[in-house]
Amino acid sequence: MRQQNIRSYAPRLIIMVKEPVAGRVKTRLAKSVGSVAATAAYRKMLTSLVARLANDARWMTILAVSPDVAAASPMLPNAIARVPQGGGDLGQRLHRVVNATGRGPVIVIGTDSPSVMPSDIASAFKVLG
């Protein structure tokens, strides 16, 4: 895992991710295409999104991982800082992750954003000011 000081004031892009395990991701899609195909789709979306966004020098990318024990999972892209999401509803998990990763501008996205480009993230940070 790339060593980063995630407690900095640098702009942070947090990507909320699940460990790509069949039966735990894309469960609604799995009802029509099966859990193996749904998991493969999730993995492709995750790796594509991370490949496009994670190495941009304008922000620090952090994976917020669920379940918490998956923070060390070899199934997730390595060389990126990871933090556990913790328990609770989405609002509680977002609050926890944002507070655990530093101060300054932050954008949080999920993996269901297959068309998000670095220019979109840069524009969002610009709007945040």
Image (cartoon, rainbow, N blue to C red):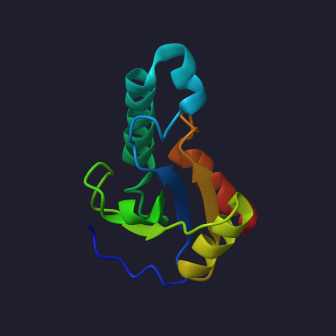
Tell which of 82 and 59 is nearer to you.
82
Residue located 42% across and 57% down the image: 56
Residue located 74% across and 60% down the image: 127
Give the answer, above or below, for where 12 lies relative to 108: below
Horizontal side, residue 79 vs residue 87: left or right: left
Give the answer, above or below, for where 55 lies relative to 3: above
* Total marks placed: 0
If the image is split into quadrants, where does the N terminus sit? bottom left
Tell which of 102 and 30 is nearer to you.
30
Tell which of 23 and 98 is nearer to you.
23
Residue located 58% across and 38% down the image: 112
Give the answer, above or below, for where 38 lies relative to 127: above
Horizontal side, residue 60 vs residue 11: left or right: left
Q: Position of residue 8 (x, y in %)?
A: 50, 84
Seen as rendered, the residue at the extreme top is 32
If the image is split into quadrants, where does the C terminus sit? bottom right
Q: Position of residue 39 (x, y in %)?
A: 41, 31
Q: Position of residue 119 (x, y in %)?
A: 56, 47
Tell which of 87 and 42 is nearer to you.
87
